[in-house]
Amino acid sequence: MKELFRKYKSVLRFLLLFLGSYIVLSLIYGGYLKLSIGDSNTSDFITQLVAEQSNAVLNSLGYNAEVLANESLPSMQLWVEGVWVGRIIEGCNAISIIILFAAFIFSFAVSFKRTLVFFFAGATLIYAVNIVRIAILAIALYQYPQYQEILHTVVFPGIIYSLVFVLWVVWVRNLNLGKKNDSSFQGGERGMHEG
């Protein structure tokens, strides 16, 4: 059993860090939602902010857009040119995706500063792309309502998850490049001392 544990130590470490980070961050976010929404039918602050920012992007692109609080559900109604195109719910604010991204990054943490910088840069990029994604989805739903199902369930989720995957690949490649640079630097240093 010890041999098996030793053999798969790095895999087990990754799984424990990933699951631990994901669970802790999800619990914190769940607590935020419970405090923010409570028993009311209002959206949480982050979802409202994402809705307002997506609305601003739509208006800056020349569309007459408007977001209104939904009185019966914790969501924001999104209107484009007077046509209701959909609801922005808590799941649309990208926080759950950022938590997934963070859990992966933290499970491959190298140095505190480097990991934190990459996390904040990646989270900011995911958040910004999500706002643009919602705005473009709203335009697509306004222009092509007959494709609502495929746009909402396949195309636009694919965009945000592809971005997260690319960021994960960049993080892992960056770690491998750092290891190669460290080993070549150490080898060069040793050569200078020996010669």
Image (tube, helix red, strand yellow):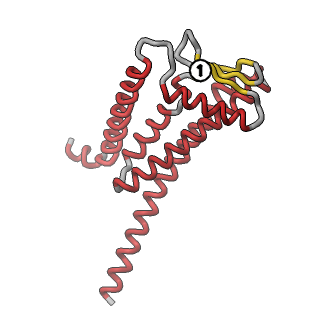
Residue drawn 54% across the image and 26% down it: 48
Residue 170 in the figure: left or right of residue 62: left
Where residue 41 sits: x, y (%)? 50, 13
Q: Nearer the viewer, residue 115 or 167?
A: 115
Q: Nearer the viewer, residue 158 or 92?
A: 92
Where residue 77 sits: x, y (%)? 63, 19
Query: Disc count in the image?
Result: 1
Residue drawn 75% across the image and 19% down it: 83
Residue drawn 59% across the image and 28% down it: 51
Q: Residue furthest right?
A: 143
Where residue 37 sits: x, y (%)? 44, 18
Q: Quadrant of the C terminus?
A: bottom left
Residue 139 in the figure: left or right of residue 19: right
Q: Residue furthest left?
A: 2
Three-letter amino acid code at disc 1?
Answer: Met
Q: Examine the image and state in which quarter residue 21 appears.
A: top left
Residue 158 in the figure: left or right of residue 108: right
Q: Residue furthest top?
A: 72
Q: Examine the image and state in which quarter residue 85 appears.
A: top right
Q: Quadrant of the N terminus?
A: top left
Provide the residue designation for mark 1: 76
Does residue 6 sit above or below 194 in this rendering? above
Does residue 44 sit above or below 185 in this rendering? above
Residue drawn 35% across the image and 35% down it: 19
- Callout 1 secondary element: strand
Mark 1, Cα crowd under 10 Å, few <14 / some 14-19 / many 20+, is: many
